[in-house]
Image: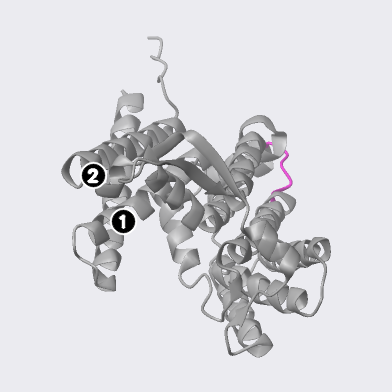
Amino acid sequence: MERRREPFTDTQLLMTITIGIFIAMYAAAMIFLRGGFLRTQQIFDLLNDNAPLIIVACGLTVVMIGGGIDISVGGVTSLVVMSCVLYLNGNGSGPVSLLLALGIGLAFGTLHGLLVSYLEIQPFIVTLAGMFFARGMTTILSVNPQKLTHEGLNALRSVKIEIPWLGYVAKNGNLIPGRIELGVVVALLCVIAVFLLLRFTRLGRNFYALGGNQQSALMLGINVKRTRFMTYLISGLLSGIAGYVFMMHTGAGNATNAAGAEMNAIASSIIGGTLLTGGVGNVIGTFFGTLTLTTIKKIVVTSGLKDPWWQSITTGAMLLFFIVLQSVVLSQRGKRKAR
């Protein structure tokens, strides 16, 4: 008997569920909470505030698809921010500061990739050490917060892309155009680049094969060590970019910058349909996973629950919900395929 072809792969199905839940949740907020949710600027603000998280989550998605984990990304992002702010405040140049950010990210990605792939040390231990090292180096650079004083970069920070037809009319009758920061453009370009990498390149297909079954990947002739190394290299590179975007958004360096970013990035990836076991995931789902995670936090605050622990509780509950949902959906699909 001929097997019926599934309309969606596991990756596509989980991504579709995430997008549907985000749309339903945001629509409910517009109906019941109204306020800022009725304005398109609310969406733009979600993107403006979370562009660095989107970039970091893209890197985590690549690593997790390959069956690994990287919890150093928040520390690397913080180190990049502080390093670039101090360099620029010391009469450094903008282009060199960008190279510095990319260099720091690539250095961590290379070291983690070598230790995990070629020395076969557990990725959790390696990246945990990387996180502590990066956080410690950030504090050594400066214990006190450092404000960006570089005129050129501050001028660039003030640039906003205006979209008049997606604005809103204020109470005084003036049209307020929608505004997005340059960091959002960078984040969207990163999402597109990673999507194209995973969808249309041999390296991207190798990531899925590696995360799905390492032994099968070896039998297919895939260089497992090099492929795993590339996942960490990409994650490190994106952490460097995220750090630079974070600096452009806040205009300051602080030892607590990007605190919890690694956990939020992992949560965003899981909510977006990426499995911790590897082999399943999509960066578009991760993008909507990030929006879902940040929107639920916004809903909690708008509802009047402004204490920080309520955000933690709702994040944990949502993460658990999506993990259970993924398990149930994939289990049912597996039973149908078995029939």
Do labels 1 and 2 touch, CB within 8 Å?
yes
Density class for disc 2 (Cα within 10 Å; few <14, some 14-19, many ≥20) is: many
Q: Is residue 8 above or below residue 138?
A: above
Element under disc 1: helix
The mark that comes first in sequence, 1 or 2, is: 2
User: In the image, what residue type sits under mark 1?
Assistant: Lys
Residue drawn 68% across and 60% down? 155
Query: How many numbered discs sit on the rendered protein?
Result: 2
Q: Which residues are magenta?
A: 220-224
Decide which of 92, 290 is in the foreground and name it: 92
Give percent across and percent down for residue 179: 51, 46
Residue receiving disc 2 = 29
Q: Is 327 placed left or right of 7 in the picture?
A: left
Q: Is 2 placed left or right of 241 in the picture?
A: left
Residue receiving disc 1 = 298
Residue drawn 53% across and 53% down? 51
Q: Is residue 245 magenta?
A: no
Q: Is residue 196 visible?
A: yes
Residue drawn 70% across and 40% down? 203
Quadrant holding the C terminus: top left
Give percent across and percent down for residue 69: 54, 60
Q: Is residue 292 above or below residue 312?
A: above
Give percent across and percent down for residue 97: 78, 67
Mark 1 vs mark 2, CA separation in Å? 10 Å
Residue drawn 58% across and 89% down? 144
User: In the image, what residue type sits under mark 2?
Assistant: Ala
Q: Is residue 232 visible?
A: no
Q: Is 3 placed left or right of 76 in the picture?
A: left
